[in-house]
Each structure stands twice: as structure tokens, then as C-alpha cells.
Amino acid sequence: MTATATPPTGTRNMTMVAAINDALDIALAADDTVHIFGEDVGVMGGVFRATDGLQAKHGEARVFDTPLAEAAIVGMGIGMGLAGLKPVAEIQFAGFLYPALDQILSHLGRYRHRTRSRYHLPMVIRAPYGGGVHTPEQHADSPEAILAHTPGVKVVIPSTPADAKGLLLSAINDPDPVFFFEAIKLYRSVKEDVPVGDYRVPIGKARLVTQGDDVTVICYGGMVEVAQKAAAAAAQAGIGVEVIDLRTLVPMDTDTIISSVARTGRAVIVTEAPRTAGFHSEIAAVIAEEAIEHLRAPIVRVTGFDAPYPPFTAVEDVYRPNPLRVAKAIRQVMNY
């Protein structure tokens, strides 16, 4: 049985982690080909409790624990997807994904191309990413640029509970592989009303967070709330900031970016990944190629640093972009 979206019937106030749990519950109930697996997702309900209660409700055959072996998790999911199932794998932290890169680069993204579209691979890989909660080493990495560079896969990063639910349900029902990154900082720090039932948000469409005519700030995931705070501070100084939440890196909503930058003439890009060759560079390149005649100032990037993400300590507050750094970038492009 394959799930189809039904109109929502009301809302429920949820955190992001609760919205993700709700989406997974709905997908399992609607489609018996959906299977969830990963390290500690079953009995424990996941390290962040995103799968809490799902094994008890849907059974050990549908929600099950795996060994600490990321390459095996992804490899098994590839086989399940090719066999007609809809695997939803959890990588406990995005920084643990690296042992599985051979499966991803050599196999996961290539099956449609390799078989000339005779085979699809409907697999979702969920992973918490990013900082803001003082985690240990390799628990706060942002490897989205590596995956965005991999042909054949989609990359989705929500920033609100409603988007997390709607995008995850869309990802599970997508015929191709989708990486679904969840900002650790946002799991429980924000709540909002989320549509109940099988609610979908389309993959590939950005969200306009705030409107403004002076500067466009482009961001995603955990950096959206940072950009919103900077935009609020800029508004007090009479600067109108348009904040765009990409939601999806691959495919990227280029039309929304170019339309906004063409109107404002200024662009600031905010991500927490290292600076060199981050996804912010791709966004900047697209703006330079398609909207350079509209720019009134050079594009400014606010990013992490070219160093491993700092574990535990307060140094994280220096590494991770904050509203003050974004506000300074806004002022920089305004004063050019």
C-alpha cells in the first residue's frame, strides 16, 4: 500500500522532534513497505527520541536496531530499496556518516543512472547535524556540501516543526534517495502549530521567512533562527531584510533566490559549515552567474571556520555563526 496525502484536519502544537516522530508514525501506518532502522532507534527510541514508541506500536520487524556500522546501515538500505521497500535509515549524528560514503558515492546515487531509470531507490537517510548544544567531537558536523555534490540524491534541511513533518513525509514518498538533516539545536528549542494527518511540503521550494527590500539573507536549518534575529535587529535600524529559508539544497529553489536578490541588490549567505567549498559557495556562484547585474555590493558569506567543529567548550559560541556576525554582514553590504 502506498501513502497518499490527505488534507490536514486541524493542528497540534509540537516541537521539531515530535513532528518528526509524528511523520514517521504516519508513514509506517499508511504504507507497510516503510521500515525504520538505525543505531538505538528501536527499544531506546533514538538518541534524541525521534523514534520513541514506534517499535512498540509497529513491531520489531518494521522498526529495528542495527549494529554501530554506518556503511552496513546504508548498504542494507540500498538493498531494501531495490527490493521494493521504503527504507528510512537513521545515522545517529551526521558526523558519523563518513564511513558510509563509499556506499553513497558509488551506489546510492547511481542506480537510476546506472539502469537508465528502470530502477529507483526510494531511501531516506535521517541525521542530526550542526551545533549549538555543546556536543562532543564529530557530533556537530555539517557535511551537507559533500552530499549536495553527489549526483542522484536530494538534500533536505528543515528549520521548523511544520516543515520537518511535511518535508519528511514528502521524502519518504519520493522515488529517489533523500538525505534529511535535522538541526540538533532546533529539536526542542521551538514549538509551533503543525497540521495533523498526512501533511506534505514539496521538496525543492524555498520559504520566505521575512520580507524586505534592502538585503537578502539566504540560509537553512539551524541558521534560520540566527538570521531572523539579525533581521529583527536590522529592522530597528531601518534596514529591510528578506530572509529566505532554502529548505532544500538539492534541488535548490534558484528562482526564489534570484528574484529576491534582483530586487534587493545585496546578498548575505549564512551557514555553519566550514568556509572553504561549503554549500554557501554554490549559492554565491548561482547569484554571480544569474544576478550579478543587480548587485550593489559584493556577496558576503557568514560561515563556520576551516577547522574541526570544537567539542564541548564555549569556543563553539565563537565558531558557530551568531546574530551579531550576521548583523555585521548586513551592515557591511549596506555600507559598501
Image: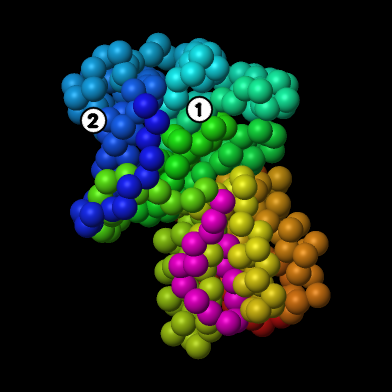
- Is residue 65 positioned above or below 193 on the image? above
Rendered image quadrant of residue 91: top left
Residue 132 in view in this figure: no
Residue 150 location, x and y as percent? 68, 34
Residue 123 numbered tag: 1
Disc 1 secondary structure class: loop
| Disc 1 and disc 2 in contact, CB within 8 angstroms | no
Left or right: where does residue 241 sit relative to residue 88?
right
Residue 38 visible at all: yes
* Residue 167 placement (x, y as % from top left): 43, 46
In the image, is residue 320 above or below residue 58?
Answer: below
- Please provide percent x and percent y for residue 178: 53, 35
Is 312 on the left or on the right of 259, as rendered? left
Which residue is at 24% across, 27% downward? 54
Q: Does 213 lie within the magenta span?
A: yes
What type is the residue that disc 1 sits on?
Met
Specify the farthest residue to the bottom.
Answer: 238
Which span is picked out in magenta? 204-218
Label 2 element class = loop
Question: Above or below — where is 208 with respect to 250?
Answer: below
Looking at the picture, does residue 276 appear above or below residue 322? above
Front position in the image: 174 or 165 = 174
Q: Nearer the viewer, residue 322 or 54?
A: 54
Q: Mark 2, residues whose alpha carbon is within 10 Å: few (<14), some, or many (≥20)?
A: many
* Residue name at image x 51 percent, y 14 percent: 83
What separation in Å lies between label 1 and label 2 (alpha carbons)? 21 Å
Precedes in sequence: disc 1 or disc 2: 2
Expressed as whole percent of the image width and height from the top left, the position of residue 283 reads 68, 56
Q: Which mark is residue 52?
A: 2
Q: Amino acid at mark 2?
A: Asp
